[in-house]
Image (cartoon, rainbow, N blue to C red):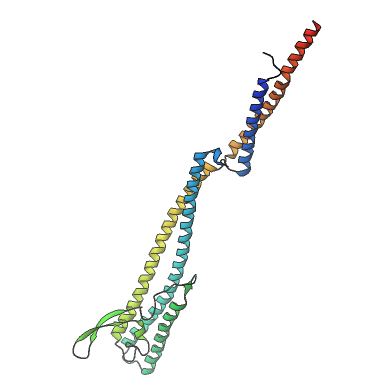
Amino acid sequence: MISIASNITALRSVNTLNSSTRALYATFEKLATGRRINRASDDPSGLMASDHLRARQAQIEQQIKAMEIESTRLTARDGAYDAVGEMMLDLEGLVVSAASTATMTDGEREAMQIEIDSIVKGVDYAAATTRFGGDLVLEGVSSRTLGEITLLVDDGQGGQVSRSFSLADLATGGELALKSGDMTFAQSVAKAATGEVASMRGAIGNRMKDLDSQARTLTSELEGVVKARSQILDADFAAETANLVRNQVLQQAALYTTQMALTQNAGIAMSLLSGAKNG
């Protein structure tokens, strides 16, 4: 049937042209954005999977950032405890020297006491001023808590009573000062302070080691999440370039066939009318 009122062939060609044009625009968009999914209609299930992976990626990145901050804080604490540890070693050496030198003069003992006083004050100063991000890194540390031990001492009535001593007692005026204090007790306090600082540094080191291990695990997971999301979301440029060429060819072909369909029926009809007239 030849009809010029309803050109079904032209209509089909126009639909094909519109479809190829939409596909061409979609390919242009993917190449321009670098993404295979630019809206929910492109791939609903893929977009949902991508959003879940994006949420997990953000969570992992936040965890890694928090670990980096904690690691930096621990490094600052370790540095502060290292400085205090050096002071404790010096203190222990002074106390041992004072206890083992029976011929030490009063002047020498006084000079050593000045050094001990300086160390005790240095511990308190470091604890009160060493900060990281506005927070004290040696919070809870002081000459009254460091090296604290409990010993049995003579109560003056033939019995014994428990007494607590700390680093502060080694300073001038303290019960374990060099001039009048018990040097055995003083050595115990100094040794306990050194051991306490070493234990704190050990704990800090273990925590930093744990953080490094956790960070490596999270970094590995992050790489996997980013890769998975990229496979879902990102466009394949090689494939999309091939699609671009294909859609351009289809568009040109559809345009040509549309033009042919629009003129073909009219041409045939005119030929029939011309033949009828001549006949």
In the orientation shown, which residue stands out farthest toward the bottom?
106
State the image coordinates of residue 24 (x, y, percent, origin top left): 64, 34
Q: Which sits in the foreground, 237 or 186?
A: 237
Residue 277 falls in which quadrant of the image? top right
Quarter of the rendering containing residue 198: bottom left
In the drawing, does residue 42 fall left or right of residue 192? right
Q: Position of residue 191 (x, y in %)?
A: 33, 78
Residue at the spot 74% in from the left edge and 17% down from the top edge:
266
Residue 128: image location, x then y, percent: 45, 78
Residue at the right extreme, as displayed: 278
Instruction: Name which residue lies at 39% across and 70% down.
Output: 201
Q: Quadrant of the N terminus?
A: top right
* Quarter residue 30 falls in: top right
Residue pictured at 77% horizontal, 11% vertical: 273
At 21% from the left and 85% from the top, the residue drawn is 160
Give coordinates of residue 251: x percent, y percent.
67, 30
